[in-house]
Image (spheres, rainbow, N blue to C red):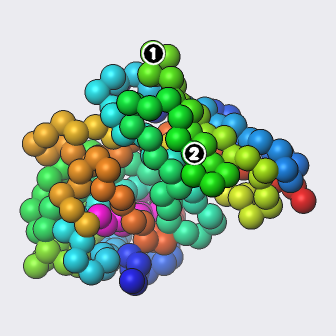
């Protein structure tokens, strides 16, 4: 019930395309959903995040769509660029009080390649 | 602002040997996390510190893994003895506040451990 399932495992698009990465969760107690971007040899870096009280959040070329009833959320990258080539992780967290706040549960990751 | 520092960046050891990793979080960050990232998977939380106290170590294999955070700043993660399945990247992250759900976690570059 603590899992976050991410798909696809890898994705290849042309420059200017709109890659979409999907995540699904089971635990309805999750109430914070960040996306992280990781380049080779680097640690993950927060890209964008959403709370379940909104259905969409946009920051620059990155958009999160959130479907609370389906327990799914997705990342869209508009006008993708070769520099966006990286591994993307979705994650989920909840405030459970006590010892559990802040704990991130990550998806398996999606390797995105954007060809010039 | 300097980022999260980790050392060493790479380590190769034989199984049954011991190894230690060091992390220096961003100055002033109260919460420190250690994650294990196995190749092809998302990071998995091993232990979370609030200042120098343990908040969550539910996924730490305590028979072989140990961690400490002296004086609420630097932290070390130790594996003794190492097993083949411990081969992974060990990521350290820190956050400013109490690890609340919207408290951004900043990751270091990680230590890549190979156990032969």
Please check the rendered image and state whether residue B92 is part of the magenta-colored stretch, yes or no: yes
Subunit of label 2: A
For this orientation, the residue located farthest to the top is A69
For the stretch drawn in magenta, the main secondary structure is strand
Q: Which residues are magenta?
A: B86-95
For the residue carrying disc 2, how many other residues have a C-alpha within 10 Å: few (<14), some (14-19), or many (20+)?
A: some
Please check the rendered image and state whether residue A88 is part of the magenta-colored stretch, yes or no: no
Q: Are marks 1 and 2 in contact (CB under 8 Å)?
A: no
Q: Residue at x 53, y 41 (%)?
A: A57
Q: Residue at x 63, y 54 (%)?
A: A60
Q: Which of A54 and A13 lies nearest the eye of the viewer? A: A54
Instruction: Decide: is B86 above or below B5.
Output: above
Q: Where does label 2 land, which residue?
A: A58
**Which quarter of the rendered picture does the C terminus of chain A lie within?**
bottom right
Do marks 1 and 2 both belong to one polypeptide chain? yes
For marks 1 and 2, give the CA distance: 20 Å
Residue A2, picture quadrant? top left
Left or right: B80 in relation to B55: right
Residue B40 seen in this snapshot? no
Where residue B29 appears, as percent x and y from the top left, is: 24, 71
Tell us which disc is closer to us: 1 or 2.
Answer: 2
Q: Where does label 1 land, which residue?
A: A69
**Which quarter of the rendered picture does the N terminus of chain A lie within?**
top left
Where residue B58 appears, as percent x and y from the top left, is: 21, 44
Where residue B47 appears, as percent x and y from the top left, is: 25, 55
Q: Which of A32 and B42 lies nearest the eye of the viewer? A: A32
SS of the residue at dot 1? loop
- State which tag comes first along the sequence, 1 or 2: 2
């Amino acid at each position: 019930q603590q899992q976050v399932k991410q798909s696809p495992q890898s994705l290849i698009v042309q420059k200017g395309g709109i890659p979409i990465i999907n995540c699904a969760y089971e635990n309805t107690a999750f109430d914070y959903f960040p996306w992280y971007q990781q380049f080779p040899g680097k640690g993950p870096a927060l890209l964008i995040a959403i709370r379940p009280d909104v259905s969409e959040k946009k920051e620059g070329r990155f958009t999160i769509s959130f479907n609370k009833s389906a327990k799914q959320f997705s990342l869209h990258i508009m006008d993708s660029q070769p520099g966006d080539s990286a591994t993307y992780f979705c994650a989920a967290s909840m405030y459970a009080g006590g010892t559990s706040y802040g704990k991130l549960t990550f998806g398996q990751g999606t390797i995105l390649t954007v060809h010039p | 602002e300097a980022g999260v520092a980790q050392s060493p960046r790479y380590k190769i050891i034989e199984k049954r040997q011991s190894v230690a990793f060091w992390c220096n979080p961003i100055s002033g960050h109260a919460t420190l996390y250690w994650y294990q990232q196995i190749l092809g998977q998302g990071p998995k939380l091993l232990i979370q510190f609030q200042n120098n106290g343990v908040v969550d170590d539910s996924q730490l294999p305590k028979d072989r893994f140990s961690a400490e955070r002296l004086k609420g700043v630097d932290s070390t993660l130790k594996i003794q003895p190492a097993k083949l399945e411990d081969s992974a990247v060990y990521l350290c992250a820190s956050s400013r506040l109490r690890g609340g759900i919207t408290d951004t976690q900043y990751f270091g570059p990680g230590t890549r451990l190979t156990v032969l």
